[in-house]
Image: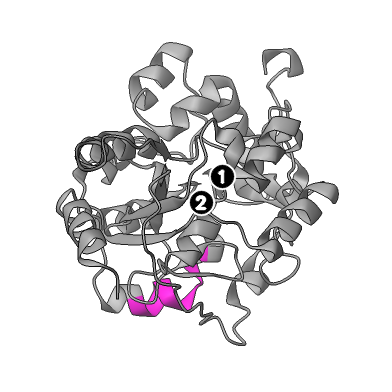
Amino acid sequence: MISSELEKIKQFCLAQGFDLVGFCKAEIPEKDRNNLLSWVEHGFFGKMNWYTKEVSQEIRLDLKHLGFFPKSVLVLAVVYNSPAAEETIQAQPKKVSRYALGDDYHSVLRKKANPILKELKALYPNHSFRQSVDSLPVPEKVFARLAGIGWMGKNTNIINEELGSYFFISTILTDCEWEIPLQKEFDRCGSCRACLDACPTGALFEPYKINANKCISHHTIEDRNSLLNEETKLSDWIYGCDICQEVCPWNKTKARRNSVKTSMDEFLPYPFWKEEDLSGEKVFSDEEFQSKFKQSAIGRIGSLVWNRNLKSVLGSKEINRKEI
């Protein structure tokens, strides 16, 4: 049981539209520190070279390098999937990850958290607060697990037994030293291997471990080479990849049975997804791309990478290396 103080904060966060709220100490267990170091040492970070930067590593392993010394973490989660997203995915022969069908979650979650930050600063005027939405080198999934949001699945996503794994995570770090009871950790994956067996590139090479160098999602977003690798080109994914989540029983069965869907309209698919046929040789000019994706997470890859992905998946190799 959390204190009445934290319960009030939790209820306030839920009232802002978040689906899950949890708290944990701002401490990174030795096991997780070692896992991160090993992951980096083996080069499994792919093109995400910021993982190797000294400052980034220091912050991930020792949070005092953030500029203040956080003692507690407020973890927020919100579902992004919806029946409309499922219909969109099924209708498109070439696919875009569900999380990117609507507005950019970075912007949405920052906006949704503003009233929370304002409330926290009013309650604790002598303390500091800092939000992260994939924007700070902090282990958000580790904190989500420690806060009881869910467990780390074999596909390396956080899974909640009622909601599945189609949800975003945001954290608010603070130097408030809240009294937070230790959450009992659990793992409900059992002997299931659905995600590992379904991954077409072998990116999930062991339970709970991912090699970004082989991950379709990574290559379609972070890889700036002129041509995609052969394994990604054979997939149906133009941006991201949801295969390891699609096959997960907690999404296929439990979340579907619970009729889990987003409560935030910002994450619903844009209307144009019903109009666009991504199976054709349609590429976008910079102007067309920005017009469609300026508020989407897809916008960050730019028109050249989008067109490369589309052409590569369709078997075309017409984009010049100098254009990327």
In the picture shown, does residue 307 fall above or below 262?
A: above
Q: Amino acid at mark 2?
A: Glu
Residue at which label 1 appears: 138
Kindly give the residue lying farthest to the bottom in the view shown: 191
Q: CA gap, disc 2 to disc 1?
A: 6 Å
In the picture shown, does residue 142 fall above or below 272?
A: below
Instruction: Give x and y (percent) for residue 176.
Output: 38, 47
User: Disc number at residue 140?
Assistant: 2
Residue 159 is one of the magenta-drawn residues:
no
182 and 179: which is toward the camera: 179
Q: Quadrant of the C terminus?
A: top right
Q: Amino acid at mark 1?
A: Val
Q: Secondary structure at mark 2?
A: helix
Colour scheme shown: one colour
Q: Is residue 158 left or right of residue 102?
A: right
Instruction: Give x and y (percent) for residue 296.
Output: 38, 31
Kindly give the residue lying farthest to the front in the view shown: 126
Can residue 221 be seen at all in this image of the molecule?
no
Instruction: Give x and y (percent) for residue 49.
Output: 73, 33
Q: Quadrant of the N terminus?
A: bottom left
**Residue at x 22% of width, y 60% of height:** 5
Instruction: Give x and y (percent) for residue 160.
Output: 40, 71
Can residue 23 be seen at all in this image of the molecule?
yes
Q: Secondary structure at mark 1?
A: loop
163 and 198: which is toward the camera: 163
Query: Overall secondary structure of the magenta stretch?
Result: helix
Residue range of the region highlighted in magenta in the rendering: 245-254
